[in-house]
Structures are given as structure tokens and as C-alpha cells.
Image (cartoon, helix red, strand yellow):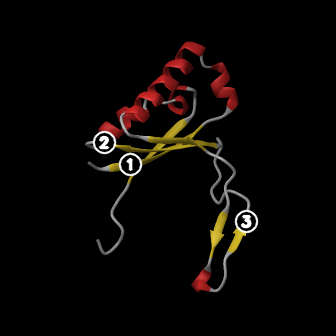
């Protein structure tokens, strides 16, 4: 079955202004996804890694991309189609609590 990487963006203010009953239902939905095989986690502090032409590893403790909302978490889900993946994450905390969820189809590496 196809896999999708989802990236949830959301801030505390949007979370706080969402009724607790909706937040609780969204967290329960995430637990249902986990029970059916999804891998879900909250985002920690990012580290950029570079190794141009294998000349030496350089790191920077910062996000490479920035947005109006911070990255809140990630999920790796399986879905029959992009539309199915969208339906699965539409009830997640970031989608419900005034954030946004990106859905990225995972493609096989080049050469496969």
C-alpha cells in the first residue's frame, strides 16, 4: 500500500482556542491511526546536515524551512490513495486546531 509522510504545523494559540472536546477527539483519532500502523511523533529541535561533495559534515541547529506556524509533528501513514491519506489526516490535531497538515506521497528512490 502506498505510504505518505505528513507534516503538521500548528501553534499553541490555535490549539488553545479550539474546544477541548475537539482537541480530545483529534488526539483520539491520532491514537486510532497509530493502532492501525501509522508512526506518529511530535517534532523536536531540528538540525541541518550538510556534506557537500563528501568534504566534511557541517551541522546547524536550526530549521532550514520556515513558516508562519512551527512544525508540530510528523506521521508516516499508509493509504490507498492521496484522497484517502487526506481523509486520514483531516481529523488530526493540527488540521482541527487552526494549523495545517501537508501530505507528501513517498516515492521509491531513484533507480528502483
Pointer 2 and pointer 3: residues touching (CB < 8 Å)? no
Q: What crowding class fits label 1: few (fewer than 14 Cα within 10 Å), some (14-19), or many (20 or more)?
A: many
Q: Is residue 48 above or below residue 66?
A: below
Expressed as whole percent of the image width and height from the top left, the position of residue 62 reads 72, 58
Of the image marks 2 and 3, the number of the one nearer the N terminus = 3
Is disc 2 placed on a helix, strand or loop? loop
Q: CA distance from mark 1 to mark 3?
A: 27 Å
* Residue 31 in sight from this viewpoint: yes
Q: Which residue is mark 3?
A: 60
Label 3 secondary element: strand
Q: Is residue 91 visible?
A: no
Left/right placement of residue 46 relative to residue 8 reads: right
SS label for mark 1: strand
The image shows residue 22, relative to residue 52, as above or below, that is above
Q: Which residue is mark 2?
A: 79
Rendered residue at 44%/26% (across/down):
29
Q: Is residue 111 left or right of residue 19?
A: left
Graded by Cα atoms within 10 Å as few (under 14), some (14 to 19) or many (20 or more), the crowding at tag 2 reads: some
Neighbours of disc 3 within 10 Å: few (<14), some (14-19), many (20+): few
Q: Residue at x 31, y 75 (%)?
A: 111
* Residue located at (64% from left, 86% from top): 55
Mark closest to the chain's N terminus, 1 or 3: 1
Locate residue 80, reporting x and y percent: 25, 42
Q: Quadrant of the C terminus?
A: bottom left
The residue where tag 1 is placed is 4
Amino acid at each position: 500500500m502506498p505510504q505518505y509522510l505528513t507534516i503538521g504545523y500548528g501553534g499553541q494559540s490555535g490549539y488553545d482556542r479550539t474546544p477541548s472536546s475537539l482537541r480530545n477527539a483529534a488526539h483520539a483519532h491520532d491514537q486510532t491511526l497509530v493502532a492501525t500502523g501509522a508512526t506518529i511523533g511530535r517534532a523536536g529541535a531540528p538540525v541541518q546536515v550538510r556534506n557537500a561533495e563528501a568534504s566534511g559534515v557541517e551541522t546547524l541547529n536550526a530549521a532550514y524551512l520556515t513558516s508562519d506556524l512551527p512544525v508540530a509533528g510528523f506521521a508516516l501513514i499508509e493509504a490507498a490513495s492521496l484522497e484517502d491519506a487526506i481523509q486520514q489526516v483531516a481529523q488530526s490535531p493540527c488540521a482541527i486546531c487552526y494549523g495545517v497538515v501537508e501530505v507528501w506521497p513517498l516515492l521509491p528512490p531513484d533507480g528502483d
